[in-house]
Image (spheres, rainbow, N blue to C red):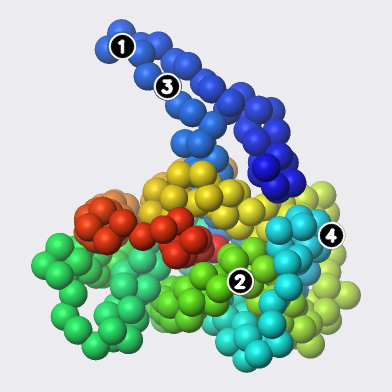
């Protein structure tokens, strides 16, 4: 067993995840370590929007992006699996992944959260699977199957419902939603670009190098914000959690879960991001979220679920080998 698997299974044990057995009046059911290991990335990334909002109390948006990437890179580098070699010939692709997966979208979210709530930002991340599927369809140059089209249509309707109430909240809110959608579209391109690279080199080595690129790109604007920051305990520890967990450990957990239960099942972690962001935004920060936006987020997740079911059906027909299955099917937020 690899070192990072030992670490995460130890974490699972600390959380009581090794084999949690619950009983109810309807009978018994078991929540295994594997199931909760799949949930870890979704819970972390769902909480990341709360951490961003708290971090903005002490530091500017560019500083948040730089700090989370720097801490995430340092955390990821601790895991030997992430330090496996990547050929120099792959670096142009790695650099583009660094821009589209990390530097650009992670720069958009703090600016967006200056204009809209952390809950709304998290709920709009439900569009990531839709964006990824649309880009993949364009690259393939063929019409997707009926279930995928249904999922895309439902998801896009849901995204429209999420964003609709912000139209009546003024220009600032519209700009915030636009920044989030720009980040989500960037994720769609990044995940499709990353797929062949991670198949060849592994997800963690690719992500580590991509974060190196992102740290370099965000430093010129991020370092001045860090130097001008006025730290208090809550923002400080929020950014520490955002970087170490949201930009580091969550990826290790996802890669470990994919290795144990398969990439498609591991990608289910993405379904947790919108509800976790919503709950934390409302309960911790007292944010108001329009009922229509909540309904839209649920519709969007339902559309992504339909597309995932179609993917599972294709995988059962093709039966790919474990080495051919992409690991990073979900996306950081």
User: Secondary structure under badge 4?
Assistant: loop
Give the residue displayed 19% in from the left and 66% down from the top. 148
User: Secondary structure under badge 2?
Assistant: helix
Mark 4–mark 1 distance (CA, rounded to whole Å): 50 Å
In the picture, the quarter occupied by the N terminus is: top right
Decide: is 61 above or below 281. below
Mark 1–mark 2 distance (CA, rounded to whole Å): 44 Å
Residue farthest right in this picture: 227
Give left or right: position of 231 versus 98.
right
Give the residue displayed 83% in from the left and 81% down from the top. 224
Mark number, residue 30: 3
10 Å crowding of disc 4: few (<14), some (14-19), many (20+): some
Mark number, residue 201: 2
Give left or right: position of 17 versus 142.
right
Give left or right: position of 212 versus 330.
right
Give the residue displayed 31% in from the left and 11% down from the top. 27
Q: Nearer the viewer, mark 2 or mark 3?
A: 2
The spot of residue 8 in percent (x, y) is 66, 41
Mark 3–mark 4 distance (CA, rounded to whole Å): 43 Å
Precedes in sequence: disc 4 or disc 1? 1
Q: Nearer the viewer, mark 3 or mark 4?
A: 3
Whether residue 274 is visible to the viewer of this picture, yes or no, is: no
For the residues labelled 2 and 3, say whether their Cβ atoms are less than 8 Å apart: no
Give left or right: position of 124 versus 44.
left
Mark number, residue 27: 1
Mark number, residue 231: 4
């Amino acid at each position: 067993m690899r070192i990072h698997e030992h670490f995460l299974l130890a974490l699972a044990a600390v959380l009581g995840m090794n084999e949690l057995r619950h009983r109810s009046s309807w009978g018994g059911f078991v929540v295994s370590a594997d199931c909760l290991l799949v949930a870890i990335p979704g819970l972390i990334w769902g909480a990341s929007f709360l951490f961003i909002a708290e971090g903005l109390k002490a530091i500017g948006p560019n500083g948040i992006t730089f700090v989370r990437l720097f801490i995430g890179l340092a955390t990821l580098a601790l895991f030997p699996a992430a330090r496996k070699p990547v050929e120099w010939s792959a670096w142009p692709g790695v650099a583009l992944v660094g821009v589209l997966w990390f530097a650009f979208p992670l720069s958009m979210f703090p600016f967006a959260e200056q204009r809209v709530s952390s809950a709304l930002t998290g709920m709009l991340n439900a569009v990531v699977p839709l964006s990824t599927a649309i880009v993949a369809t364009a690259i393939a140059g063929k019409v997707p199957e009926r279930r995928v089209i249904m999922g895309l249509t439902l998801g896009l309707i849901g995204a429209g419902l999420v964003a609709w109430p912000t139209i009546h909240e003024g220009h600032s809110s519209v700009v915030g939603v636009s920044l989030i959608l720009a980040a989500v579209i960037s994720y769609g391109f990044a995940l499709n670009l990353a797929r062949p690279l991670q198949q060849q080199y592994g997800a963690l080595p690719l992500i580590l190098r991509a974060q190196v690129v992102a740290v370099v790109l965000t430093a010129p604007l991020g370092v001045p914000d860090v130097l001008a920051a006025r730290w208090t305990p809550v923002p400080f520890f929020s950014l520490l959690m955002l970087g170490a967990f949201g930009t580091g450990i969550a990826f290790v957990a996802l890669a470990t879960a994919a290795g144990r239960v398969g990439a498609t099942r591991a990608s289910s972690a993405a379904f947790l991001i919108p509800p976790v962001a919503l709950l934390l935004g409302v309960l911790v920060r007292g944010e108001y979220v329009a009922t229509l936006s909540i309904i839209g987020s649920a519709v969007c997740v339902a559309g992504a679920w339909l597309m995932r079911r179609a993917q599972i059906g294709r995988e059962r027909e093709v039966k790919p080998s474990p080495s051919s299955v992409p690991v990073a099917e979900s996306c950081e937020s």
